[in-house]
Every structure is written in structure tokens, then in C-alpha cells.
Amino acid sequence: MSRICQITGKRALTGNKVSHSNRKTKRKFNINLKAKRFFLAEENQWITLKVSTSGMRNISKNGLYACVKEARANGFIK
């Protein structure tokens, strides 16, 4: 599976690595992605999500069930 946050949909960005001599080569800016288990009380089961740290903040702010419901509607979680 690719490195995409299952809550926010964030993915890696591409850009240039710029050396001291100002040469530019392509590079990738990966997101801060963690695999984390959450207990979904409404469905009475544990789920494992690949979540960015900003996604974890969204979960703590809005609640797990609301975030999972929105992510399923957007197609990030099956």
C-alpha cells in the first residue's frame, strides 16, 4: 500500500533538492506516517490505520467515529 494517510488523504510531495552550487535534483517529501491501532467503540472492534500525525490530531479533536465515517465517504478507508 502506498504512503497515504487514511484520514486526511495526505500523500508525499515532490520537489527539488538544491545543492550549495544550486544544482537541482528531484526528491520526495514524505509525510509523517504512523501505523496505529484504534478501538472503534461504535462497531466494537479494533482497526489499524496508517495515519499522519495531523490525522491523529484530527481524530483527537473530532472523535474517531466521525473521522472514520468521513474517510469512508471519501474513499480513503474501505
Image: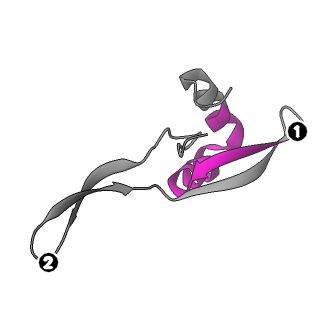
Q: Which mark is residue 20?
A: 2
| Image coords of residue 57 (percent x, y) | 56, 54
Between 72 and 20, the residue placed more toward the observer is 20
| Image coords of residue 2 (percent x, y) | 55, 41
Considering every residue shown, the one lying at the far bottom of the view is 20
Q: Which residues are magenta?
A: 47-68
At mark 1, the secondary structure is strand
As measured in the structure, the alpha-carbon distance from the residue carrying label 2 to the one carrying label 1 is 52 Å
The residue depicted at 69 percent of the width and 42 percent of the height is 64
Q: Which residue is mark 1?
A: 45
| Image coords of residue 10 (percent x, y) | 46, 43
Callout 2 amino acid: His
Is 30 situated left or right of 78 in this image? Answer: left
At mark 2, the secondary structure is loop
Q: Is residue 75 above or below residue 42?
A: above
Considering every residue shown, the one lying at the far right of the view is 44
Viewport quadrant of the C terminus: top right
